[in-house]
Image (cartoon, rainbow, N blue to C red):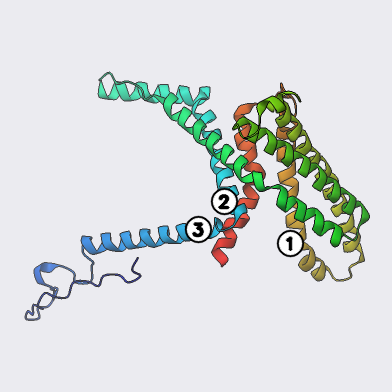
C-alpha cells in the first residue's frame, strides 16, 4: 500500500482575470483551496487503508506466538458462544418481534421475520470449531508443562510454600493435559474407544481431566495468598515509598490479573467437574470465560503497538 497521497490536479492551465474589488480571483466563483469531492474520497480511502494495515499488522504480531494464536481462537469461541445465547434470549427475541411489527406497520406490507435460528446455529458451530482447534493445539501441552516443572526444580523459588504449591500445580496440570489428550484422541478414533470404555468412557476422562484442572485453580488461590503475604513483608521493610511503587507496581498488576482470571474460572471449572453440574447457566459460560482472559488479551494487544 502506498504511503503517499495523490496531490491535487494541477494540469489545468491557470486562468487570470483583472482584479475586481470585493470579488474572488478564482474562476466561476469557486475556491481553489477547497479539495474536490474525488480527492476527499481518495484521502478518506487512504486513511481507512492505513488504519486497516496497522490493525492487521498488530494481529499478525499477536499471532506469531503459539500463545497468541490460542488466545485468538479462545476469544473467538467465547464471544460467538455468548452471542449465540444473546440472540436466543427472550429479551432479544421480544425486541426483534417489536421491531418487526413496527417495520410492517410502517411499510403496510407483510414481511417475513428474519430466520435467526440459522445464524445462531452458525455461531454455535463456530464456537465449537474454535474449541476443537484449541483441543488440537493442547495436544502438545505436556512439553511446556515439563519445562515449567524442570525450571522450578532447577531454580526453585526462595519461599518454600510457593515452591511446593508450584510443584503441585505442575503435577495436576500434567494429569489434566494427559487425560484430556487421551479423551480427545479417542473421540477422533486415534485411540481405541474400547480401551477408554473400560475406564468409564470418554466423558469420564474429560471430567477427571477437568477436576485436575480445578486442582490447579485451587492451588493458585493459595499461591496468590502467599504472594500477598510476602509482598506485604517486603513493603513493610522498605524505607522509601517511591521505591515501593516502582518495584511493586508491575508485580501487583500481574497479581490482580491472575486473581481475576482465577476467580472467573473457579465457578465454571467446578461446574464442569460434575456430570450434572452445579447449576451454572450455560448461557453465561462464554461471557465468563471471556472475562477470565480479557485482561491478558488486552496486554497482548497493547504489546503489539509498542514493538
Q: Where is residue 108? Give x, y as percent.
A: 25, 20
Q: Nearer the viewer, residue 86 or 208?
A: 208
Q: Secondary structure at mark 2?
A: helix
Q: Where, by quadrant of the figure, is residue 33 drawn?
A: bottom left
Query: Which of the image's four quarters has the N terminus?
Result: bottom left
Q: Residues within 10 Å of mark 3 (few under 14, many from 20)?
A: some
Q: Relative to 106, does residue 61 appear above or below in the rendering?
A: below
Is label 1 or label 2 in front? 2
Q: Secondary structure at mark 3?
A: helix
Is label 1 or label 3 in front? 3
Q: Which residue is most to the top? A: 110
How many numbered marks, from 0 up?
Answer: 3
Instruction: Say if residue 280 shows up in the picture.
Output: no
Is residue 100 found left or right of 248 in the rendered image?
A: left
Residue to which mark 1 is pinned: 250
Is residue 176 found left or right of 27 in the rendered image?
A: right
Q: Nearer the viewer, residue 57 or 42?
A: 57
Q: Which residue is most to the left? A: 18
Q: Residues within 10 Å of mark 1 (few under 14, many from 20)?
A: few
Q: CA distance from mark 1 to mark 2?
A: 25 Å
Q: Identify the mark nearer the N-term, 3 or 2.
A: 3
Q: Identify the mark nearer the N-term, 1 or 3.
A: 3
Which residue corresponds to the image point at 36% horizontal and 25% vertical from the top-left? 114
Residue to which mark 3 is pinned: 60
Q: Where is residue 199? Give x, y as percent.
A: 76, 25
Q: Where is residue 281? Give x, y as percent.
A: 65, 26
Which residue corresponds to the image point at 17% horizontal and 75% vertical from the top-left? 10
Instruction: Say if residue 12 shows up in the picture.
Output: yes
Is residue 292 found left or right of 27 in the rendered image?
A: right
Q: Identify the mark nearer the N-term, 1 or 2.
A: 2
Q: Which mark is residue 69?
A: 2
Asked if disc 1 and disc 3 are in contact, CB closer than 8 Å, the reply is: no
Amino acid at each position: 500500500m502506498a504511503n503517499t497521497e495523490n496531490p491535487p490536479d494541477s494540469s489545468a492551465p491557470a486562468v487570470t482575470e483583472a482584479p475586481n474589488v470585493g470579488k474572488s480571483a478564482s474562476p466561476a466563483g469557486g475556491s481553489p483551496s477547497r479539495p474536490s469531492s474525488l480527492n476527499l474520497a481518495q484521502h478518506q480511502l487512504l486513511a481507512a487503508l492505513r488504519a486497516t494495515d496497522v490493525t492487521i499488522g498488530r494481529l499478525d504480531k499477536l499471532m506469531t506466538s503459539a500463545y497468541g494464536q490460542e488466545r485468538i481462537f479462545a476469544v473467538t469461541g467465547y464471544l460467538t458462544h455468548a452471542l449465540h445465547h444473546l440472540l436466543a434470549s427472550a429479551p432479544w427475541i421480544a425486541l426483534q418481534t417489536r421491531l418487526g411489527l413496527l417495520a410492517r406497520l410502517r411499510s403496510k406490507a407483510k414481511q417475513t421475520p428474519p430466520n435467526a435460528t440459522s445464524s445462531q446455529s452458525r455461531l454455535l458451530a463456530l464456537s465449537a470449531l474454535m474449541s476443537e482447534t484449541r483441543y488440537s493445539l493442547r495436544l502438545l501441552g505436556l512439553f511446556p508443562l515439563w519445562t515449567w516443572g524442570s525450571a522450578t526444580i532447577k531454580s526453585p523459588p526462595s519461599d518454600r510454600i510457593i515452591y511446593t504449591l508450584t510443584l503441585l500445580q505442575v503435577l495436576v496440570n500434567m494429569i489434566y493435559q494427559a487425560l484430556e489428550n487421551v479423551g480427545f484422541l479417542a473421540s477422533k478414533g486415534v485411540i481405541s474407544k474400547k480401551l477408554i470404555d473400560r475406564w468409564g468412557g470418554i466423558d469420564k476422562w474429560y471430567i477427571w481431566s477437568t477436576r485436575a484442572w480445578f486442582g490447579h485453580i485451587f492451588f493458585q488461590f493459595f499461591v496468590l495468598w502467599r504472594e500477598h503475604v510476602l509482598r506485604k513483608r517486603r513493603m513493610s521493610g522498605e524505607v522509601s515509598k517511591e521505591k515501593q511503587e516502582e518495584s511493586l507496581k508491575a508485580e501487583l498488576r500481574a497479581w490482580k490479573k491472575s486473581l481475576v482470571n482465577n476467580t472467573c474460572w473457579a465457578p465454571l471449572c467446578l461446574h464442569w467437574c460434575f456430570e450434572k453440574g452445579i447449576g451454572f447457566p450455560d448461557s453465561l459460560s462464554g461471557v465468563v470465560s471471556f472475562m477470565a482472559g480479557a485482561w491478558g488479551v488486552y496486554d497482548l494487544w497493547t504489546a503489539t503497538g509498542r514493538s
